[in-house]
Image (cartoon, rainbow, N blue to C red):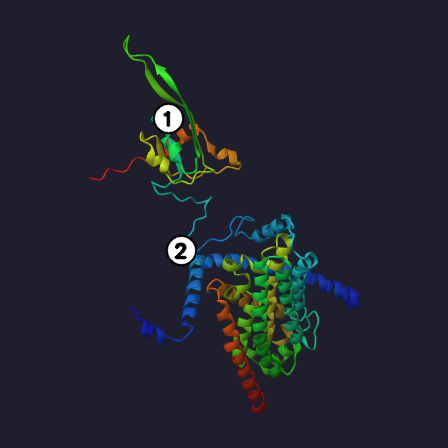
Amino acid sequence: MTTKTTERRVLPGMGMVKGLWVTIYTMFRTIFRPGKYLATINYPVVKETPVARARGVIALDQEACTVCMLCARQCPDWCIYIEGHKEEKEPDKPGGRIKVRNTLDRFDIDYALCMYCGICVEVCPFDALFWSPEYEYSETQMGDMLHDMDRLQGWLATVPPDPELEK
Amino acid sequence: MSFLTELFSNFWVSLVGKLLIVALMIPLVGMVIGFAEIKLSAKMQARMGPYFAGGRWGWAQLIADGVKFFQKEDLIPDQADRPVFKLAPVLVLVSTVGLLVVIPFGPDLIFRDLSVGIFYALAISSLSTVGVLMAGWSSGNKYSLMGGLRAAGQLIAYELPLVLAVIGSVMLAGTMSMSGIVEAQIAAGYPYVILQFLGFGIFMIAALAELSRIPFDMPIAESELVMGYLTEYSGFRFLFFFLAEFANMFSLSAIAVTLFLGGYWLPGIPESVLPYAGPVILLAKTFLLVFAMIWFRWTFPRFREDQLQSLAWRWLIPIALANILITGAFKVYL
């Protein structure tokens, strides 16, 4: 606990000396014990495990999707493309009502546009979209950043289980 | 051997040889210091630094950077004054080459031992200011112009303490020749930093300002002026400025070593081994000072323009003048 008055009695320029000490101390520390003091990791060789709820990539559960278009309409970047059609299902009993079911034809997310806000995940009423912590999906061509339905379904396997509910 | 001596006694052969050595030295020294800078700055910030280029330690990083610069488009803005724009980086590099000429690397190892060595060195180092001002003016860009003007103002302010700090050593040695100053230090038996510690400190501060390196990088202050006078430069013209900065760090440090730290001489080293050990000693001392420059850069924040000017005019110049008076008194009465 140093008060302001005691700090002023210190020799002028001591702050600069202190700063020089910090940089050279950090330098030798990092050179001789990089394992302990390195603040960064050597990425492609060593990989960091992202936290469980990291926003890496969005996964799609095709079974749960009802083609309600809420996610596409809420998306601030308009990076979700959805197409679907209605399928008629035969009634269970003869003479019953014909059931209509929405089926997904196309569900693309353009990760070149996506800004990872997560509104689509929040807004989905049927829990068809999930955050996955995977982050290694860079491409050499911009067009390849458009993930189609099946690729998004593939990310589903990497989604971590839900956390325990709070009591 | 006699054949070689005869060959190099020919004026033109020795001139071409010396030119080749200087031309090779500038990129080499620039790369070594540039690599030291990126690697040491990384360690000072607890980072790894370049790692993959060249297989180990990222040693080829700057070679890759150089190749990258040559691949880039040589862009000249429409509004630029073309001949001046093209000449500016060359002029900056020429002043760097000129500085190397008078540095004594050993008792006989000097490109040209001028009798006004240190005077010549200071004169030619201010040539780079002209180059910087030309670059700023000819870019046709207001940020560049502001950067160039700031560089000019800064270099006028810091040229004075630089010259005044040198005078102390010149007075003690009684000569302006660079090798003469080193010989005077050998004869005196101590490096002049012992008497001229004020002069040495002022010289190093002013040299940092001359180089416009970070505590003094107002001319290229990227948060205010984009990149100052470098804004419009790309490709190998930018590389020229880049190399000149690092080579200038080396040559100004070598001049400081020659004037204040005994040059190629260490106390306790017999004079008979100096021709061989001299260059190594000089390089070791020089790189020590270069390390200090890198260290300061990654520690201190940038000065404000008024702080920068008041440091030069209100502190450095009066102290340097007082230093000259004290040195004069010392010289006369002791």
Chain that bears disc 2 = A
Q: Quadrant of the C terminus of chain B?
A: bottom right
Front one among B87 and B23: B87
Provide the residue designation for mark 2: A37
Task: Please tell me whether mark 2 sits on a helix, a strand or a loop.
Answer: helix
Which of the 4 image quadrants contains residue B157? bottom right
Q: Quadrant of the N terminus of chain B?
A: bottom right
Provide the residue designation for mark 1: A67
Which of the 4 image quadrants contains residue A78? top left
Residue B281 in view (yes/no):
no
Residue B222 in view (yes/no):
yes
What amino acid is labelled 2 in the image?
Answer: Tyr
Task: Please say if the residues under marks 1 and 2 sit with CB atoms less than 8 Å apart.
Answer: no
Front one among A151 and B216: B216
The picture places residue B209, in percent across and down from the top left corner, at 55, 68
Distance from Cα at disc 1 to Cα at disc 2:
50 Å
Residue A114 drawn above or below residue B164: above
Front one among B85 and B209: B85
Residue at the far top in the pictured view? A94
Q: Residue at x 58, y 59 (%)?
A: B142
